[in-house]
Image (cartoon, rainbow, N blue to C red):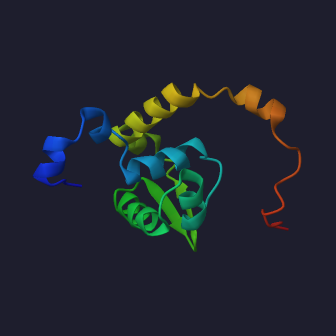
Amino acid sequence: MSIDRDTFENTSEDELAELSVPDQVLGFLAANDDRAFKAREIASQIGLDEGAVSTALSRLKDRGLVQHKATYWAVTDDTERLDGYSGYERATALFNDQLGTEDKESWLEHAPSEPHPSVEDEQ
């Protein structure tokens, strides 16, 4: 997305380096690659407007970076495609810097044994 010249001149490099909406959406989905979400759930989780998230999801789908079925969205399982997307790499590095790298074993120790009540039983 482009910015106007005034914003370019008067905004710090740190502010301009913040993750774009598609990068934030893709980063969230990649961090939760074992699940699929509705756009409103993604927006709520990352603190963005649902319309902006929906637009980002459509653009990410056009690039083959996310999958869409009914009202649900998930990150692609095509790791080569993800690895080739520089925004994904930047998002992962930023999240790792802010939150630390994920230790799956540690997470599993604290994970609930039962699904969250909002998850519908698929039986």
Q: Residue furthest front?
A: 10
Q: Split into 4 quadrants, where in the image is the C terminus?
A: bottom right
- Who's the residue at 46% across and 41% down the image? 79
* Residue 92 left/right relative to 17: right
Q: Split into 4 quadrants, where in the image is the N terminus?
A: bottom left
* Residue 120 left/right relative to 53: right
Q: Residue furthest bottom?
A: 70
One can see residue 85 in this view: no
Q: How many discs appear?
A: 0
- Who's the residue at 59% across and 53% down the image? 45
Q: Residue furthest right?
A: 113
Give the image location of residue 2, x and y in percent: 19, 54
Closest to the observer, 73 or 40: 40
- Who's the residue at 34% across and 56% down the image? 63
Quarter of the rendering containing residue 106: top right
Q: Residue furthest left?
A: 5
- Who's the residue at 47% across and 52% down the image? 25
Closest to the observer, 35 or 8: 8
Give the image location of residue 89, x and y in percent: 40, 35
- Is residue 114 placed above or below 123 in the rendered structure? above
Quarter of the rendering containing residue 100: top right
Give the image location of residue 116, x and y in percent: 81, 56
